[in-house]
Amino acid sequence: MTDTWLLYSTFPDRKEALSVARALLEKRLIACANLHENVTSLYRWQGEIRQETEVVLTMKTRRENLSHAIAAVKNLHSYDLPCIIAYPIGEGFPPFLQWIADETAGVS
């Protein structure tokens, strides 16, 4: 098991997802982010089944930064109840995992 985590969140559009990714990168809360556009999301909200096109943002960070990164995404997000979840990365290419650790080191 590594100390590396993947954050996942959905956004209404590319502009907002990019803005959040850049803000977290500038604060070194994440090492990198990937946008997955034109994702169809189906969900129940306020008693209705809805279908929307969203943008998925996946971000890589360390466990130490999770609470700060989650709080930052929440503060920058336009949704009332944003999807923000984190997954531990069990294994990976060691030099890449080290790069993530190096890029997110020193965040308080």
Image (cartoon, helix red, strand yellow):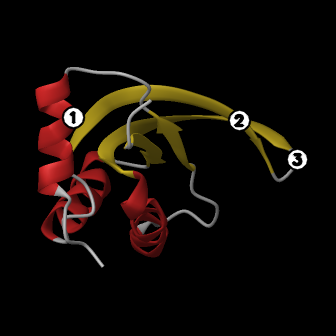
Secondary element under disc 3, as helix, strand or loop, is loop
**Residue type at tag 3:** Gly
Mark number for residue 43?
Answer: 2
Mark 1 burial class by Cα count in 10 Å: few <14, some 14-19, many 20+: many
Residue 15 on image: x %, y %: 24, 54
Classify 13 as above or below 6. Answer: below
> Which residue is depicted at the point 21% across and 34% down?
97
Classify 41 as above or below 106. Answer: above
Quadrant where the N terminus sits is top left
Q: Nearer the viewer, mark 3 or mark 1?
A: 1
Quadrant where the C terminus sits is bottom left
* Mark pair 2, 3: CA separation: 10 Å
Residue 86 on image: x %, y %: 51, 44
**Residue type at tag 2:** Tyr
Mark 3 burial class by Cα count in 10 Å: few <14, some 14-19, many 20+: few
Classify 72 as above or below 25. Answer: below
Q: In which quadrant of the rendered view does residue 103 lie?
A: bottom left
